[in-house]
Amino acid sequence: MIHAEGPLLSVDIGSRETTEEKIDDVLESFVGGRGVGTKLAHDRIPFDADPLGPDNSLVFAAGPLQTSMMSYTGRLSCTGLSPLTDGLLSSNAGGFMSRPFVDTGYSAIEITGASDELVGVHVTDEGVEFEPVPDLEEATVEETTDYVGESAGLDKEHTAVVGPAGDNEVRFAAIITSGSRAFGRGGLGAVLGAKNVKFLTVDGDSRPEIEGLDDELVREIHREASESGSPMKDAGTVSVSDYANAVGALPTKYFQELSYDAVDDIGSAAVIEHKYKKGTCSSCAFACKLPTRDEESGLETEGPEYETMMSFGSNALVDDFVAIMKSNELCDQYGLDTISCGDAVAAYLAANDEFGNADLIHELVEKIAYREGVGDTLAEGIDRFHDELGVENWTMKGMEFAAHDGRTLNGQGLSFATSNRGADHMYAEMYQLEYPLVAPEQALDSDGVEGKSERLVEMENKNAVHDSGVLCKFAFSSMTHERYARLFDADWETLMDVGGRIVELERHFNNQRGFDRSDDADLPYELEGLDAELSNYYERRGWNDDGTVPDGAVGGSGAAPADD
C-alpha cells in the first residue's frame, strides 16, 4: 500500500526539546494524514487530558500524494483533542503549505507541552528553532504572516498561525495557513494558542520519494481537473445554494426555517459577480477558490464558501453579500471557524431579536476573538452558553451544525448523529447522495434513515482514507473504486479496512472520555427510525449496542460485515 514516508518529529514546547523517531509501522498501516494523526494521537494523548492543557498534542501530517504534483493534493491534516467537542478530532486545510511540509522530510510533526512565553516554531530539514515573539500577542493572521515574511524570509505558504482567537483560547479558534485557508472545525487553534505557539513554519529540501505512485493516473486526474466544467469552478461550494434552498435543506433564522427567500442575493450569482480572479491550492488545476472583491468599499476576501453563506447569511437573516464577505474576512484575520462562529452569533441574534443586524454581527465577531463582554460567553460555543441565552442547543457532540439540513436530508441527519466529530458535514457527506450530487445509480432517497447504515459506513471509511491521502473532497468526481486501488496500490476492501480502523480509533478514544450511544442519539430534532438504525450501524461496525468499541477490538477491521 502506498503511504507517506519519513520520521515523526516531536516538539516539546515547554522543554524546547525535539526528538525524531521512525514510525514506519504506523505509516504502512494508516497511509498518512488523518490516519497517521489519529493513530499517534490515540496512543500518545492521555485519555483524561485537558484539551487546553500541556498533555494534549497536535499532530500535523501529510500523506503520500503531497510528494506528487497531482491536482486535489494541496492539503495537510491536523489532529488533536478538541476543546469544543472534548473528543479526538482531525481537520485538514488546503492552500500551499503541504509541499513545504513534505520538504522538511518529516511525515508528521507533533506539537506537545506548553511554553511559558509566546513563541514561533521554525521547522526545517536541518533542525528546529524556537523564536520568542511577545510582541505578536493578539496579532492578526495578516500581521503575523507579514512578520514571518520580514523576519524569516518565508511567505504565508510556509506558515500556519493563530490569530487573536487562538491566543484567547476561543473554543472554535482555527489555525490559518496560506493567509486564508483554515484548519477550521473543532478549535485546534485554541490548542495551539494554549501552548503559547503563535506560528509554525516549515521549509527544507528533503522531500521523500514515494515509490510505486501511478504516474499515469496522476497525470490523468490532473488533466481531468484542468478540463472539468464543474460549476464549483465558478462559485465554489456556494454553487449548491440554490438547490439546497429549493429542496428545503438550507438552515435559516437560527435553524427555525429551512429556506431563505433572499438566497439569490447571497448565493452563487453574488459570488460570481464579486469574484475577480481564479484561486487554487498547491499544484491543483481545478481552481475552485473564490477571491472576491467589492469594488465600492475595496473589501477583499477569499469566499465565502457555502457553509459561511449559511452561518453568516441565511441563519442570521443577512441578505447583504458584502456584509457576509466582511464576516468571512474578520474570521480569517482573527482565526475563527466561520461555521461555529456564525452559528454562535446567530444564536445571540435569536435571543435578542436582532436578526439581520450586520453591524452587530461584525462587532460580535471581534468581541468573540478578544473575549470581550458578551464575546467571552459566545466564545465558549453554543453547547456551553445556550441555557444562559435561552436558545435551543443546535450542536451535536458540542459542535455547531453545518448546512445540508438533516431534517430534509435524513441520511445526512443520521451521519451527523454517528460522526465522531459531531455536527460536521464532511465526515461522511451523505448529503451528496441525497440531493443528489452524484450519478442516479449512486443516489439515495432523502426520506428516512432505514437501511442507510451500509452506505454510511462506506462513506465514513472512504472519507477517512481520502483524508489520509490527503485529498480534497472535490476529487471524488475523479475517484472510482478502481482509481483508489491504483492510487494507493491496494484493493478496495483493504482501503475500507484502513478507513474503518481510523474511525474505530476515534470512537475508542472518545469512548474513554465518556462518549456513547446517548451522544449519537442527541440530535436537536426527531428522525423517525433513528434508534433502530443506530443499532444497525453499530452492528455493522462490530461495536457494542451502546455505541462503544468492544474491549480488545481496537485496531481490528472496523469494516462492515458481509450482508447476510
Image (tube, rainbow, N blue to C red):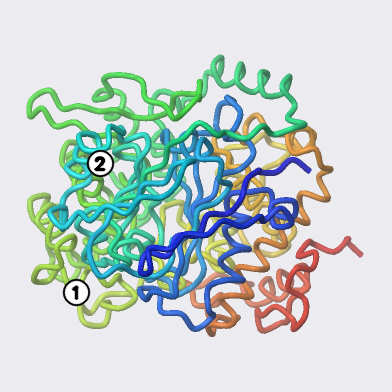
| Res. 382 visible in picture | yes
The residue that mark 1 highlights is 377
> Is 247 left or right of 467, judged from the image as shown?
left
* Badge 1: residue crowd in 10 Å (few <14, some 14–19, many ≥20): many
Front residue of 39/128: it is 128
> Is 353 left or right of 443, judged from the image as shown?
left
* Badge 2: residue crowd in 10 Å (few <14, some 14–19, many ≥20): some
Q: Specify the amino acid type for callout 2.
A: Ala
State the image coordinates of residue 508 (x, y, percent, origin top left). Answer: 64, 75
Residue at 19% in and 74% down: 377
Front residue of 69/247: it is 69
| Res. 425 visible in picture | no
Residue at 34% in and 31% down: 268
In space, the residues marked 2 and 1 are separated at their CA atoms by: 30 Å
State the image coordinates of residue 472 (x, y, percent, origin top left). Answer: 54, 38
Dot 2: what SS? Answer: loop
Number of marks in the rendered image: 2
The residue that mark 2 highlights is 262
**Badge 2 or badge 1: first in the primary sequence:** 2
Residue at 26% in and 67% down: 169
State the image coordinates of residue 428 (x, y, percent, origin top left). Answer: 59, 54
Dot 1: what SS? Answer: helix
The quadrant of the picture occupied by the C terminus is: bottom right
Which image quadrant is residue 1 in? top right
State the image coordinates of residue 351 (x, y, percent, origin top left). Answer: 18, 71
> Is 130 left or right of 66, judged from the image as shown?
left
Nearer the camera: disc 2 or disc 1:
1
Check whether the beta carbons of the residues at disc 2 and disc 1 lie within 8 A of each other. no
Q: Specify the amino acid type for callout 1.
A: Thr
Question: In the image, which disc is placed on residue 390?
Answer: none
